[in-house]
């Protein structure tokens, strides 16, 4: 009877050990899945959603106007993205023709922050007047915009990771209709 009782105990012990091992493997898989999916921190994306032209003035060799842009910051992370003050720059063939300040803000987790900026632009800093005159006569100005938002992703108020969102957009400004077309952001 003692050998029979010993084998029953041994079987129960092995069965208990198998359950504990299966539980440990299951928990490890859950933790690994959580780390790979939730804690993977990606760069947020900043884009110009729409843009309009106001207070425009065009002559044969100069321009000035205000561009009203709707900017979006898309945060796909499970933590919020706090970014500092930044500058959005509008350029004409590499020459900065306008700048606007993007105030510090917070994009909530897995959401998109939207805000408006107004960029006054002027051709006073453009050196290539021949190219500018040619573009104004054709009725199309090729502009580009850049911005970099630097900040931190906060996960569960425990983890902090420095990340930045960069914007690079190109657009065509049609002087005849005072409209922006072919807006493309990367």
Image (tube, grey):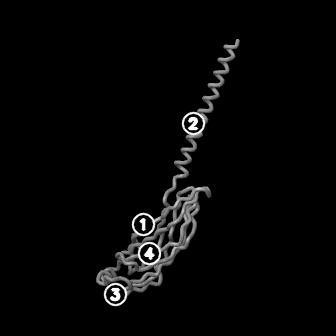
Dot label at residue 25: 2
Which of pointers 4 and 1 lies earlier in the amino acid sequence? Answer: 4
Can you tell which of label 3 and label 1 is closer to the viewer?
1
- Gap between marks 4 and 1 measured at Cα: 14 Å
Dot label at residue 185: 1
Give 171 or 2, whichever is nearer the viewer: 2
Give the vertical position of 82 relative to 68 (above or below). above
The residue indicated by pointer 3 is 60
Which of pointers 3 and 1 lies earlier in the amino acid sequence? Answer: 3
- Gap between marks 4 and 3 measured at Cα: 24 Å
Residue 119: image location, x then y, percent: 47, 78
Label 2 residue SS:
helix
- Gap between marks 3 and 2 measured at Cα: 74 Å
Quadrant of the image containing the N terminus: top right
Extreme-top residue of the structure: 1
- Gap between marks 1 and 2 measured at Cα: 45 Å
The residue indicated by pointer 4 is 89
Q: Residues within 10 Å of mark 1 (few under 14, many from 20)?
A: some
Q: Residues within 10 Å of mark 3 (few under 14, many from 20)?
A: few
- Gap between marks 3 and 1 measured at Cα: 29 Å
Asked whether disc 4 touches disc 3, contact meaning CB atoms under 8 Å apart, the reply is: no
């Amino acid at each position: 009877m003692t050998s029979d009782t010993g084998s029953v105990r041994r079987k129960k012990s092995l069965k208990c050990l198998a359950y504990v091992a299966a539980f440990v493997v299951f928990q490890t898989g859950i933790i690994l899945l959580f780390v790979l999916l939730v804690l993977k921190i990606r760069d947020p994306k900043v884009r110009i959603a729409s843009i309009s032209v106001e207070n425009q003035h065009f002559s044969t060799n100069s321009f000035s106007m205000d561009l009203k842009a709707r900017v979006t910051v898309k945060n796909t992370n499970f933590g919020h993205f706090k970014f500092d003050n930044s500058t959005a720059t509008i350029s004409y063939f590499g020459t900065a023709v306008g700048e606007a300040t993007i105030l510090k803000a917070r994009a909530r987790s897995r959401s998109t922050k939207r805000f408006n900026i107004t960029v006054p632009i002027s051709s006073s800093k453009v050196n290539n007047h021949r190219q500018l005159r040619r573009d104004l006569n054709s009725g199309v100005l090729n502009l580009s915009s850049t911005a970099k938002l630097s900040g931190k992703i906060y996960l569960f108020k425990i983890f902090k990771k420095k990340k930045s969102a960069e914007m690079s957009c190109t657009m065509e400004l049609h002087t005849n209709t005072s409209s922006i077309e072919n807006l493309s952001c990367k």
